[in-house]
Amino acid sequence: MRNVALVAKGLRLGHRSRRGGGFTLACADLDLHIDEREFVVIVGPSGCGKTTFLEAVAGLVPVAGGSLELHGKRINGPGPERSLVFQQASLYPWRDVLSNVLFGLEMQGRLTGQSTQRAHDLLEVAGLAHVKQKYPHELSGGMRQRVNLARALATDPALLLLDEPFSALDAQNREILQDELLRIWQSDEARKTALFVTHDVNEAVLLADRVLVFSSSPGRVALEITIDAPRPRDAAWRRSAEFIAYGDKIIEALRSPHTESRTDDDDVTAGDAGQTNNNGKVHMGATTP
Ligand SMILES: Nc1ncnc2c1ncn2[C@@H]1O[C@H](COP(=O)(O)OP(=O)(O)OP(=O)(O)O)[C@@H](O)[C@H]1O
């Protein structure tokens, strides 16, 4: 059975100017839902409110209108069931790797034998066991971001929020980290719900159960594309015609005027590769309805 984790209805988000008065609208009329254990990726034009939405889910940006609920409860601020991973690994330079990974647990007063063991296990899975006692400045960029991921997962959050976590990495490291994230996410018995923001279309297709294409500012869901491919998704899948077709579909959506000014009644032509219904949903692959 599918349980809904996150629901946004008519959501309005923005930023109030520090000098008072002004309000920059980031998202408006945003409706979406994310199921428990689902991996949802958001793509969209620069400035369309992707980060603002993620920050609102993290409880860092207040809801200005509409509603935003996690497991049936309104989000009013940060909470231990959510972890946010930013583009730049924000590790504490005076703490070694293990102590960085344990930080969130310490802050939450949840440092037990069991949670410490989980941190060790995560470091093992992330290929970091041999650098547990090293300090951030002794690590490569890819390793630092892996530690960042392990730290976010160590608190065993129900919802993992990732804001372009691999965009600062070179292409080779990015692929390695994408594979590792998928491996960790899939191997976790209590698999997390994941919400991931990226500008990288291939990354979106590789990771997502569902891709949400945001309209230009103010952001809302212009198009939803279900990535109907089995997991684990390996190197062969990355090279498949189906993979490329999904990527083309997302690029087409990003370039479409519908992405910029879509109305609820708009229809999108999906071409040969998929079918779009009048809710802006594209389904491709074996179970295309
Ligand atoms: N702290 C802030 N104060 C004021 N305005 C902000 C702040 N952060 C973002 N904004 C504005 O809110 C809007 C949405 O920004 P946001 O960073 O959420 O977009 P984005 O889709 O994540 O962009 P990008 O893809 O370029 O990272 C933009 O107009 C931006 O200028």
Image: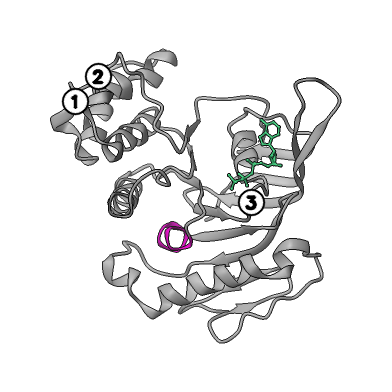
At label 3, which amino acid type do we have? Answer: His
3 or 1: tag closer to the N-terminus: 3
Q: Magenta region: which residues?
A: 201-208
Residue for badge 3: 33
Of pointers 1 and 2, the one earlier in the residue sequence: 2
What crowding class fits label 2: few (fewer than 14 Cα within 10 Å), some (14-19), or many (20 or more)?
Answer: some
Dot 3 falls on a residue whose secondary structure is strand
Compared with residue 235, is residue 1 higher up or lower down, i.e. above or below?
Answer: above
Distance, label 2 to label 3, CA atoms, is 38 Å
Tell me the element at label 2. loop
Q: Are marks 1 and 2 in contact (CB under 8 Å)?
A: yes
Q: Which part of the image, by quadrant, shows the C terminus? A: bottom right
Q: Nearer the viewer, residue 136 or 230?
A: 136
Residue at point 24%, 21% (across, down): 135
Q: Going 47% across and 32% down the picture, which residue do you hit? A: 83
> For the residue carrying disc 1, how many other residues have a C-alpha within 10 Å: few (<14), some (14-19), or many (20+)?
some
Q: Where is residue 219 in the image (x, y as percent from the top left)?
A: 71, 51
The residue pinned by badge 1 equals: 132
